[in-house]
Structures are given as C-alpha cells and as structure tokens.
Image (cartoon, rainbow, N blue to C red):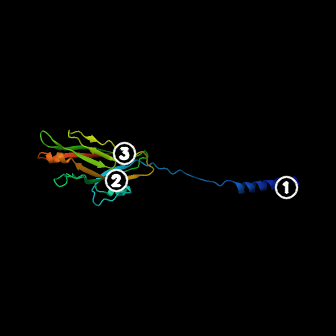
Amino acid sequence: MKSKNLIVFTLILTTLAAALFAANPTESFVVETEVLGKHGLKLAAVTGFNAPTTVSAFNAITADNTKFTVTDNNYNAQQTVRKLVAYCNSVSGYDIALSALAMKSAAATPTYIKFTVTAGGATVTTTGNGVETFAANKVIDKTSLSNIDFYDTDVKITVNATDYENAVTGTYSGTIKFELTSH
C-alpha cells in the first residue's frame, strides 16, 4: 500500500510540477511595410525661401520656372537667380546633373551669348555653337543614404559680358536644366 500511495503521490506531484513549470502560451505576428522610392526637384524663388525638412514642406514650395531676364543693369555681375531644392530617399543615393544651352538669337543666322551657371558642386559654361553643355561635376552626388535627404543650393548665372556687349539687336534665349537621378 505504501508503494501505491507513493505512486499516487508521485503522479500528483508530477502533475502539479508540470502545471507550474509549463511554458506560457504565446502568439505573434509580423508587421511589415515596403517603403517606395520618392524624390522631387524644384526651382524656387530666392526671396522668402525656407529649406524643407519634410516632404510636405517640399510640396508646399511654389515652383518658379519663370524666365530670368538679362538686362543692361545685371549682365556684368554674377546673379543668384533661383534656389534648387531636392529630396530623395533611395538607400543607394542620388545625384543632380546640370546642363545649359547658350542664349541664341532668333535671327535667321543665329548668334549666341554665352553664360556660366553654378549650382552646388557643378559649374558649366555654355558654348557658342548651339550645343547643350554638361557640367563635369554633379550639383550633388550622394552614394548612399540612411534617411531621406533634403538638399538646396543657389543657382547663379554669370553672363559673358563681351558677348552681351557685342550682340546685335534681337531676342536671345537659352536653357538651364537640372536632372535628379535616383540610384
């Protein structure tokens, strides 16, 4: 009988121990998202500019793609004509390229007024042959990002004074182009 009581006692103790030391039940699930690439590029007015630190602040900036007019009063000095504003979230980074086309007359036999554009780390001087000229360096070149990046810089123009002073009458127009490439 003692051994029967001992077996019953052992079974009760084992059952209690198993209940006391059993693993707590758990449940779990995975939280996941996919962050898609986003980037933007704008030219903005120099006056009243506030550098953005959020995408919504970037979106609130009014783009200023109006023409800049060279006159007898401003051709002979460097002019800050716009703010270039960009953002990107690519983990592999991004760059912004700069190119320009000299001001060309509307005459049947066109003549050119060259100019130099500077923005960030890029400078380009246009040629007088109607061919788009690309800056050797990028405005900015980020090779990797750990957070979304916001960037802004001044866009400055210096007109070739000799070309301007020797130009014949007429309307001349050229182009400055920026291109953001997300890596």
Query: Residue 47: x and y, percent?
Result: 27, 59
Circle 1 residues within 10 Å: few <14, some 14–19, many ≥20: few
CA gap, disc 3 to disc 2?
13 Å
Query: Which amino acid lies under the numbered mark 3 shown in the image of this protein?
Result: Asp
Query: Which amino acid lies under the numbered mark 1 shown in the image of this protein?
Result: Asn
Circle 3 residues within 10 Å: few <14, some 14–19, many ≥20: some
Secondary-structure class at tag 2: strand
Please state, as top left, top right, bottom left or bottom right, where the C terminus lies in the image: top left
Mark 1 lies on residue:
5
Residue 157 visible in the current orientation: yes
Looking at the image, the residue that sits furthest to the front is: 162
Q: Which disc number belongs to residue 152?
A: 2
Q: Please name the residue shown 67% across and 53% down the image.
A: 23
Please state, as top left, top right, bottom left or bottom right, where the N terminus lies in the image: bottom right
Residue 1 visible in the current orientation: no
CA gap, disc 2 to disc 1?
86 Å
Mark 3 lies on residue:
95
